[in-house]
Amino acid sequence: MSTDIIIQVRQPPEIPGYNDTLLVVLDNHFVFACPCSAGPNHRQTRRKGGGDWQRSYGQAAPGNYPLEIVNHYKYGMCILINGARDVPSRVPNPRQKMQPILTELFVHRGSSKRWRGSAGCPVVHPLFWKCFQHFLTERAVGQITILDVPTSP
């Protein structure tokens, strides 16, 4: 069974919340959709000054990447993007010496309704996490597509 994920990016990371859409496709059939965020936290933590997200994080660039469903020590069952290899970033990433890359990118559960708990990983709204996990089978592989979707004015 092929597991594919599509993330439709609708808003920039500086908008708080989960304004993007995640779609699950199993064997070429859409089976689930939920709110997500393709970007990192909308700002730095207060401990780090609370500045703009670009001071601390990168954001995955649009593209197609291989995925594998793994059981992560911190996130539980989640999606590993590109086999833990580098993923292009839309912006220079301060965590990677300003290189436009992200490393070890996962799709995981967001922390709360307002705080994503992400340093660059796409995250699923916490209210939808258990339902989303229903479609995850450990070691399943597929493809994740991150794409920009124009918003209406």
Image (cartoon, helix red, strand yellow):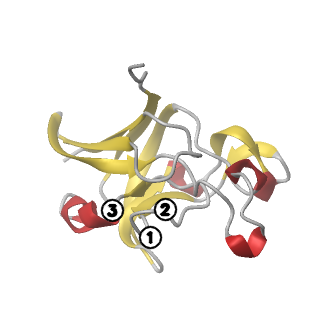
Above or below 48: residue 147: above
Choose top left, top right, bottom left or bottom right for residue 119.
bottom right
Check whether the beta carbons of the residues at disc 1 and disc 2 lie within 8 A of each other: yes
Residue that lies at the very extreme toward the front in this rendered image:
153
Choose top left, top right, bottom left or bottom right for residue 13.
top right
Which circle marks residue 111 in the picture? 1
Q: Which residue is mark 3?
A: 139
Among numbered discs 1 and 2, the one appearing first in the sequence:
1
Which type of secondary structure does the marked residue at label 3 adopt?
loop
112 left or right, relative to 101: left
Q: Residue at x 77, y 70 (%)?
A: 48
Q: Residue at x 78, y 53 (%)?
A: 55
Check whether the beta carbons of the residues at disc 2 and disc 3 lie within 8 A of each other: no
Cα–Cα span, label 3 and label 1: 24 Å
- Residue 137: x percent and y percent? 24, 62
Which type of secondary structure does the marked residue at label 2 adopt?
loop
Residue 137 visible = no
28 left or right, relative to 21: left
Cα–Cα span, label 1 and label 2: 5 Å
Q: Amino acid at mark 2?
A: Arg
Which circle marks residue 116 in the picture? 2
Other-residue count near label 2 (Cα within 10 Å), few / some / many at <14 / 14–19 / ≥20: many
Q: Residue at x 73, y 76 (%)?
A: 47
Choose top left, top right, bottom left or bottom right for residue 109.
bottom left
- Residue 8: x percent and y percent? 38, 35
Q: Amino acid at mark 3?
A: Arg
Which type of secondary structure does the marked residue at label 1 adopt?
loop
